[in-house]
Image (cartoon, rainbow, N blue to C red):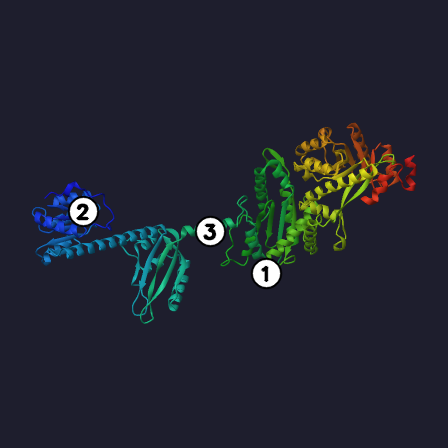
Amino acid sequence: MNATPPHGRMWPAATAASAERPRLLLVDDEPVNLLVTSAALEGLGFEVRTAGDGPLALDLALAERPDLVLLDARMPGMDGFETCRQLRQLPGLHEVPVLMITSHVDNEVVDRAFAVGATDFFMRTDTWALLAARLRHMLRAALTQSELQRNRGQLSRALEVARMGTFDWHWTGGRPGLRGFVFSEEAQRLLGGDIMAPLGPRDLLRQVAYGDRHPFLHLLRMRMNRREPLSTELQCVVHGRRRRLYIEAEPEVGDDDQCTGYSGILQDVTERHLAEQSIRRLSYKDTLTLLPNRNQITLRLRRAIEAGLRLGHDVALLVADLDRFKKINETLGHHAGDELLMEVARRFRACVRHSDLFHEVPQDGEGLRGYRRTEGVGRLGGDEFAVLLAEASEEDALRVAQRLHNALRSPVCLDGQEIVVSACIGMALGPRDGTTAESLMQAADAALTAAKRAGRHQTVAHSPSMIQQGRERLALETALHHAIERQELRLHYQPKVSACGTRLVGVEALMRWDRGAAGGLVSPGAFIPLAEESDLIESLTEWALEEAARQAALWRGRCGFGGTVAVNIPSRMFARQDLPALVDGAVERHGIPHSMLALEITESGLMEDLEGILPLLHALHRRGVQISVDDFGTGYSSLKYLSELPISELKIDRSFVINMSGNSRAMAVITSIISLAKALHLKVVAEGVEEVAHVQTLQQLHCDVFQGYFFSRPLPAEELDPWVKAPLPLRLPPDATALSA
């Protein structure tokens, strides 16, 4: 019989077996049976293809992938049994439901049908609804089986990816035994077993690392007695490699309320454990220098203090901060700064015992002196290092601090340039300065702050007053933040007098802080360094520029004052490209010429970054702003640069002036500065003029301007008004009246 459907209609490619009209391949050698059965099943919702013999049926099945096969068992040539056997061997057709149908049934026929792969057997009937129901039932069962296999495959792949397997352990009689222990295939693979040779509980125990074996058995017995869930990790050896297995199991309770076993999972968590260890190491290690970081140093310090308190010895903590590291970073770049930090770390490590240890010290199983392993060097952050000495006296700590200083004496080569670096070190001793890691770290930080205030290359040991001083400085810094908005800042002005003593040529504006009833007058020596450390100095300088310009405008309007008002400018202000704009804004708002404003910068501040400062100096000079070099003679200046700088005056530091009587070196410096200034056509101002002898000597040396207590202390603006109103002659002290002649 022709197997092609009417009108040449062909089945599409195989669709989901849950289609509304299942595709059925009907195979029978009787044309009448084919015609009648096909028509009946078509009417009952099937899409039927027919084949009159076995070979044709195999070809159609391979080409069109039917959802079901209805196969006559008795056919000439290749009968239904052989057709079914070969059908099952075709790719993709080993699971398709096959209903074998015949007119005569006996046990031998049924057994043979199932042996060749038939899904079910059915007696030939003309009750087509019953046949259709059997076919649909087979189809649903096939779909369920297919979905189950697909889910099992997905689960198996998921377990394989998760490196997880399952196990069951059941026993009878209320007493656990080694029988009834079954591992899944995935679990056997994790344990290195052969699927064909199932593993038992003894195999698992043999693979558990010896140190974990007895604790695991103890935990297992305890959980079983209490009928509690089991959750633990074990170290196992699988094919000679250490693996870490996670076990989780739930108890199963029988009808008699007795525990009858456990069901659970095994998972290989070795990679996760290694990753966690790596993360833990990274969280305790400085990635640049590979030294312990602040977290690790704190842990080590805590253990060292505990051991010190228990055994009755001291623990020393040194905190070192590199001098001028920020300037190295700004000048040579952060890459050079990183190289410097790595070199400093290497040198510091060579100064301290056991400094190469990084990993956490185990809490158990160590000897009495295990705490000594906590000695070492760490990086706290930035350019700050810590040195922990787990058993050291103050003398030992001071010797180590000196070794640290000595280690930095040799130059470091960065980008082909030799750099000599130094450090300040703060030292604290436990339990004297603190009995906790936090308090000892705080004490060392306070000592470091004192060392940095004392200058470079300093070591300072902590004293009890430092913490209180630190708190007071913090409170003072907080109050300084609000000083401008509370209008607590003042400018006092010190006169600058011509060499003949008869003319006021200008004033220097000096900042004062009056906290009123809250704290009275604060010394500039207390709050100016604090402002520089906390970056408040820029806000204070902006305020001083504005206030000086305002006062200059008042004097100019009331008294015709035409001198200069000098404002001290910290070197960091010259790092701001908007400094000329700040000056422009101040003079324009108050309507004074730029020439009435003078900016004073110290010689050392000038030379910190001369190349960067020079463009701003020229910009200010073009506007008419006068530039004065303060404290001249106390730093280092290149004569080449000095000749190129757009400056108008040099100020001789007061330390030379007050010591020039009977001090030949001070006189030599003053004479040299005045001669240099004259040669460069610069004005010379002498600070610290306090005696008649100072005035007379400086006049003989042709100094241009005097400034000092001999003439006046710094005064509030209103007290300086008489000087501004009566410049000729000035009311000089009685013993200096001859100078005005």
The label nearer to you, 1 versus 2, is: 2
Which residue lies most toward the left here?
A: 76
Label for residue 533? Answer: none
Distance, label 3 to label 2, CA atoms, is 52 Å
Distance, label 3 to label 1, CA atoms, is 32 Å
Q: Check disc 1 and report its element: helix, strand or loop.
A: helix
Which residue lies most toward the bottom here?
A: 256
Residue 690 rendering spot, x and y as whole percentages? 85, 41
- Residue 665 seen in the figure: no
Q: Quadrant of residue 517?
A: bottom right
Relative depth, front residue between 54 and 353: 54
Residue 280 rendering spot, x and y as whole percentages? 49, 51
Label for residue 311? Answer: 1
Distance, label 1 to label 2, CA atoms, is 81 Å
Instruction: Decide if residue 419 is on the left or right side of residue 83.
Output: right
Specify the amino acid type for callout 1.
Leu
Q: Quadrant of residue 439?
A: bottom right
Instruction: Decide if residue 670 is on the left or right side of residue 251.
Output: right
Q: Check disc 3 and report its element: helix, strand or loop.
A: helix
The first of marks 3 and 1 along the sequence is 3
Specify the amino acid type for callout 2.
Gln
Residue at the disc numbered 3: 277
Report crowding for label 2: few under 14, some 14 to 19, many 20 or more residues within 10 A (C-alpha).
few
Specify the amino acid type for callout 3.
Gln
Residue at the disc numbered 2: 89
The label nearer to you, 3 versus 1, is: 3
Residue at 30% x, 54% y is 185
The first of marks 1 and 2 along the sequence is 2
Task: Report the quarter where the C terminus lies.
Answer: top right
